Image (cartoon, rainbow, N blue to C red):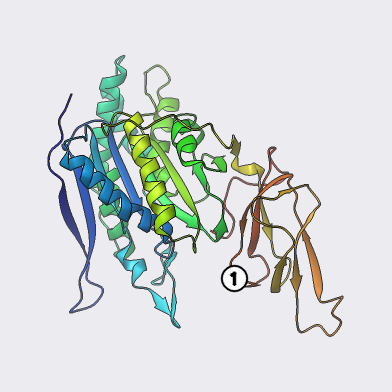
Amino acid sequence: MTKSTAKSVHFINLPDAAPGTHRAITVHKYGRVGARPKVYIQAGIHADEYPGMLVAHHLVRLLDIAAARDAIRGEIILVPAANPIGLAQFANDRHSGRFDMSGTGNFNRNWPHLGAEIAETVAPLLGDDAAANTSAIRSALLGAALALKPKNDAEALKFALFKLSIDADIVLDMHCDTRALFHMYTTPAAWPGLTDLASELGVRAIFLAESSGGEAFDEAHTTPWAELATRFPNRPIPQACLATTLEFRGRADVSDDLASSDAEKIVHFLMRRGIVVGTPGRLPDPVAEATELTALDCVLAPSTGLVVFKVSLGDQVKAGDVVAEIIDPAIPDPVKARTAVTTRATGLVLTMRDDPYLRMGDIITYVVGKEPLPRRSASLLND
């Protein structure tokens, strides 16, 4: 059994935004470098999604306690505020941390896709030993990540985080939605490997997709293993990284009570995995079954106006039910000013838009169905 070492805090410098300024990523490291399992946890890559950052704040406290009693057996890397660029972005007195204002797009899209890149490198190294294959692939992934050269600030941020995380066994990327119940996204290859995490956290919906559109952070960690296993079917290649995007309810769900409870549940998960020494208690029964992302109805606004909801979070609805009405206050006739919006899915109302004014095509709500919807791609619309 590998004993832990004292906790350390590191700072990764990013390119200066302007002369006279400085930006850095704060990284908390626990355990011994190279110990397994290795866990990477980050919050706030979408910098205007706040609950995960408060969960990380409480995780620091709990992991500090574990480190002080020499109770960490793996390696844990925790980045509580992963996006200093997005944290500084304000326009017209509003924080905007989801998209890079310099024009590179969504901070959680277009992460490096390394599976195909390392295939030729690892091909002559693969044999009949799954553990040796895992080690060779991890080394190749880390080598490819270390060789990445950023072309802009956003890539400098992404590549710095990627170098910390790409060789991890478990990756937790903490996000939130607008108004929402707790839910999570992962790839089919990583499921049911994260069933215990879903049960511990009490998530209300679990979505599986090879890609949610544009290579999200968690997908960039799981897909190389699945791709290489497909490419080399005669070589034992396990799914050696389990990564997930965790949606900690809605943006306004920022409270010490919620965050401290969530942090304790993550520590219980780490205890069950043998990464932190302790007694996690009984694993709660699962609340939700995993569904394909194509079964999620992203209900879109058919016109611009004010949204008035006819449902609440957690409601069960049927296909064809009216979930909201869009009101155009400029139309003289109050009856004609209202447009009913229905859902195609039968299931749970998972999210609701928090801004009452929306444009045509904006997402109004997510409804979790059980069966794939016609003409529904495995992509999160308007992401």
- The image shows residue 213 at horizontal and vertical percentages of 52, 50
Residue 285's place in the image compared with 26, above or below, is: above
- The three-letter code of the residue at mark 1 reads Asp
- The image shows residue 290 at horizontal and vertical percentages of 57, 35
114 vs 21, left or right, is right
Q: In the displayed orientation, state which residue is furthest to the top.
A: 128
Question: Residue at the spot x=57%, y=37% of the render?
Answer: 287
Location of the N terminus by quadrant is top left
Q: Secondary structure at mark 1?
A: loop
129 vs 178, left or right, is left
Quick one: 23 or 137, which is closer to the camera?
23
210 vs 243, left or right, is right
Question: Residue at the spot x=87%, y=82% of the render?
Answer: 333
Residue 97 seen in this snapshot: yes
- Find residue 17 and report its image quarter: bottom left
- The image shows residue 231 at horizontal and vertical percentages of 42, 27
Quick one: 194 or 60, which is closer to the camera?
60
Residue 224's place in the image compared with 149, above or below, is: above
Quick one: 317 or 13, which is closer to the camera?
317
Quick one: 337 or 210, which is closer to the camera?
337
Residue ID for mark 1? 355
